[in-house]
């Protein structure tokens, strides 16, 4: 037990150190009134069955303070009125264009194909890919351009502030920020040439047009579930600059509405995030259970032989470290601090998500999303 506890202690201390460093140094968008260089921007939105929110998204984008941009929506074979609602929401504003998606070719995943088509019709010097559920505050577009220029990024990826309401969302959605802030030192991600030291968020990816073309664009990741991360890796592969930033409320999104949608949404990508390896995913699940559930079990059942003066010092220390890491990443990304106390339940929910993904893989050969079975190609493994 002492060997396991020592290893867990060292791992948690390492994660805490990374989280502290990232919380201090992670770049954050800054609202600005004006910038000297104002290149034309193409804001590109792939949209499939987004009737409930596309109107609000388009209207918010058309209300941006940035002077020179276009908004292009691609209706990806929606079963609802996504395209018509997007068009009507602009009230004739010529900055909006809505296209119907072409049939999905063999070897492509739906979102990647939609983004590829969007890039083909874009006119801007900067290509901003964003999701239909991301809300942009009026100064957000200006802030992203300012940060892209300040950081000299060829690809700037921004993490929108995540809005969560139901318990399933609250306990799972913030774990993406937890993984980035606690596992990936920002200096390593932004300054090292190693492609594996890269992360990105497809909810907002701002490319210089020539950089998008040089890295191969979405055509180079056509069959990848985690196309955002792979594009970030490809940017590094061709010796371009990857930069990251936190949206600090200028960009906001509520990805899911309840536990079932959260379960399916995360199960869609979790296996791809583990190299499409079931063994790796199971090992990762056991690893996190050991870190964040194990100390609670030790406190409940096994501390008496390892206590100091009758107090369970070591398991309490490990529990405190786990909560501190979760709380620090929650504070840095505007999430609820109190939910950090429920980190063991979050890990159990992620275990349920992992099992869902494995079940899909065995039954269907890939995850399901918006009526499609996603068949990851060999491209996603390169």
Image (cartoon, rainbow, N blue to C red):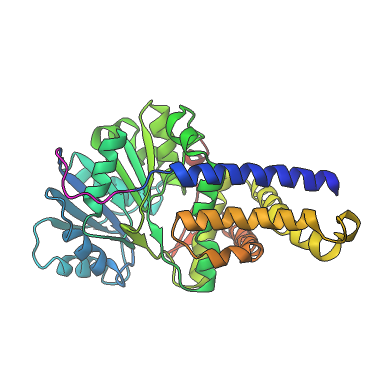
Quadrant in the rendering for residue 88: bottom left
Main secondary structure found in the magenta portion: loop
Looking at the image, which residue is at 36% across and 55% down?
A: 248
Decide whether residue 46 is among the magenta residues: no
Can you tell which quarter of the image residue 171 is in? Answer: bottom right
From this viewpoint, is residue 37 visible? Answer: yes
Q: Is residue 124 above or below residue 75?
A: above
Residue 257, image x, y percentages: 44, 72
| Residue appearing at x 56%, y 67% in the figure | 338
Q: Is residue 122 visible?
A: no
Say left or right for 238 vs 376. Answer: left
Residue 271: % across, % down:
57, 51
Question: Where are the magenta residues, as a range?
Answer: 29-36
Q: Residue at x 59, y 52 (%)?
A: 325
- Residue 63 location, x and y as percent? 16, 61
Q: Who is closer to the viewer here, 40 or 298? A: 298
Whether residue 353 sits left or right of residue 162 in the image: it is right
Q: Is residue 33 magenta?
A: yes
Residue 318 location, x and y as percent? 72, 53
Tally of numbered tags: 0
Q: Nearer the viewer, residue 316 or 49?
A: 316
In the picture as drawn, the residue positioned furthest to the right comes out as 305
Q: Which residue is painted at 25% across and 54% down in the image?
A: 140
Is 192 on the left-hand or right-hand side of 158? right
């Amino acid at each position: 037990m002492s060997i396991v506890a020592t290893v867990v202690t060292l791992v948690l201390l390492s994660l805490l150190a990374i989280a502290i460093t990232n919380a201090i140094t992670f770049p954050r968008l800054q609202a600005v009134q004006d910038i000297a260089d104002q290149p034309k921007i193409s804001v590109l939105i792939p949209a499939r069955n987004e009737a409930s929110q596309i109107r609000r998204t388009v209207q918010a984008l058309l209300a941006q303070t940035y002077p020179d941009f276009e908004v292009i929506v691609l209706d990806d074979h929606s079963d609802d009125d996504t395209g018509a609602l997007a068009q009507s929401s602009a009230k004739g504003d010529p900055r909006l264009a809505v296209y119907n998606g072409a049939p999905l070719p063999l070897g492509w995943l739906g979102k990647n194909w939609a983004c590829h088509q969007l890039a083909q019709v874009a006119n801007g010097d900067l290509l901003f890919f964003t999701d239909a559920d991301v809300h942009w505050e009026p100064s957000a577009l200006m802030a992203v351009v300012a940060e892209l220029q300040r950081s000299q990024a060829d690809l700037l990826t921004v993490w929108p502030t995540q809005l969560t309401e139901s318990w399933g969302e609250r306990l799972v959605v913030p774990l993406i920020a937890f993984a980035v802030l606690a596992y990936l030192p920002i200096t390593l991600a932004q300054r090292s040439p190693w492609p594996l030291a890269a992360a990105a968020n497809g909810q907002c990816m701002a490319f210089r047009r020539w950089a998008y073309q040089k890295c191969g664009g979405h055509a180079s990741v056509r069959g990848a579930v985690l196309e955002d991360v792979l594009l970030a890796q490809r940017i590094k592969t061709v010796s371009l600059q990857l930069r990251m930033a936190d949206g600090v409320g200028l960009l906001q999104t509520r990805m899911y509405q309840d536990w079932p949608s959260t379960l399916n949404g995360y199960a869609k990508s979790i296996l791809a995030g583990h190299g499409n390896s079931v063994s790796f995913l199971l090992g990762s699940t056991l690893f996190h259970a050991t870190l964040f559930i194990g100390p609670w079990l030790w406190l409940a059942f096994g501390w008496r032989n390892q206590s100091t003066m009758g107090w369970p010092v070591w398991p309490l220390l490990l529990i405190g470290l786990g909560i501190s890491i979760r709380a620090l990443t929650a504070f840095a990304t505007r999430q609820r601090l109190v939910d950090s106390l429920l980190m063991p339940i979050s890990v159990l929910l992620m275990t349920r998500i992992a099992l869902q993904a494995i079940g899909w893989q065995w039954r269907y050969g890939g995850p399901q999303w918006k009526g499609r079975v996603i068949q990851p190609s060999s491209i996603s493994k390169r």
